[in-house]
Image: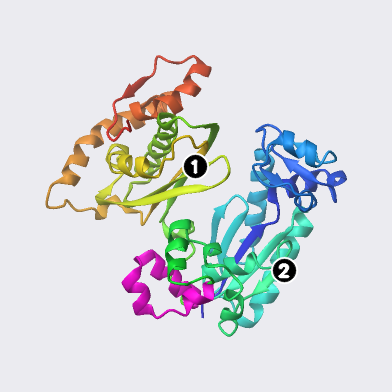
Amino acid sequence: MSTFLHLDGDAFFASCETAVNPKLRGKPVVTGADKGIASSMSYEAKARGITRAMPLFQIKKLCPECIIVPSNFKLYKIISARAFAIVRRYTPYVEEYSIDECFADLSHLEPETIPQIARAIKDELQKELGVTFSVGIGPTKVLAKVGSKWKKPNGFTVIDRKNIFNFLSEVQVGKVWGIGPSTSIALGKWGIKTAADFAHKPQEWVEEHFSKPVLALWYELNGVPVYTTENEESRHKSIMRSRTFKATTDRRMVFAELSNNIEDVCTRLRALRLVTKHLSFYLKTQQFRYHETSVTLPHETASPEVMLEALGPRFNNIFRTATLYRSTAIILSSVKDEKGTQSDLFGNTKHDKTLESVHAVIDRLDRKYGTQSVFLGSSMRAVGSVLFREKTLDRLYLPSMGEVG
């Protein structure tokens, strides 16, 4: 029987600040003094009406007693690494999902010991790090994530196959991990309001009206595991790169940041001798809303040029004019060894081969002179902002395919 644990940090950034400065405990703490908006709030600050992305001048008016501190990402990464190391004391099957979240596959453990082990993990995290995490346990990753959100903060929730629908009947379908706004609206048109409404639909109905990813969520909500934990033992089945930048409405600048991320993940693919044809990306707004889409390429590749050519039109479809964007991310999934790649009927993989010699030279230059000694033209604005600061504009750049207009 499959059993997954999901660990979710409680107001993680603010909690890290409290952990290293106990004088802040019990007080309304907000991180983000360096960004001009709230990036994280203690629960005391949330109780006073402070929300994420709220401008600091507004926070000071609403809650003069709030303690506003700069974000200390070095500290957060250290505590995050220690937290995941504690989880690995009990299982090697750990997927680091984000800086304050992870999944763990506990299926190899004796079922009767799992709640006790999960509580031990939770207690050790709080004792050793001074930070609380909410824990969810379920037969699938999606249900485990439902559980971790159930009793925040400092919650501990077990969802088993006998009580799945007791929980799902209380969860809005749009709050289910993996169901985005467009899917939520589509489900709503069929009268589906809760996760239980969706899970109770016949499999044939879901297959008829929705895509395979939505069907996978339906299985997960019904207690049938589709998603596994992705860890180092899974041979880098997915690779992700994200970067936060100064908020902007400039379409070319946002695309440059995305292009820069794609170049970075492709460099990692080539270093590991891996390829993929499944990629997705998102744009995150200043208000922490996500605009996302995915692309399946006709063949496996580690070429940023090929990926950008496919992503360009999708980017134009989801980009919203006059919207402030502050982050982009690229996620490569179903990554495989390049040795298993075969040429397709149209010779697309052969076209990739013609780029390999260019990439090999670029990779050698990066190793000798540092990363991004050579970069695509579509990345120039993102990389250029760094280059101007470093006064090294003598570096080369290449024209790219798939640039946006």
Residue lying at the far left in this picture: please name it. Answer: 345
Identified by mark 2, the residue type is Ala
Quadrant of the image occupied by residue 256: top left
Q: Residue at x 39, y 18 (%)?
A: 395
Disc 2 to disc 1, how far (Cα)?
32 Å
The x, y position of residue 313, in whole percent, is 30, 41
Magenta-colored stretch includes residue 200: yes
Q: Choose mark 2 or mark 1, whichever is in front.
A: 1
Label 2 crowd (10 A; few <14 / some 14-19 / many >=20) = some
Q: Which residues are magenta?
A: 195-223
Q: Residue furthest right?
A: 23
Q: Is 337 displayed left or right of 107 in the figure?
A: left
Q: Is residue 20 visible?
A: yes
- Where disc 2 sits, the SS reads helix
Which numbered disc flags the more N-terminal residue, 2 or 1?
A: 2
**Residue at numbered disc 2:** 120
Residue 25 in the image: state x and y as whole percent.
84, 49
Disc 1 designates what residue? 242
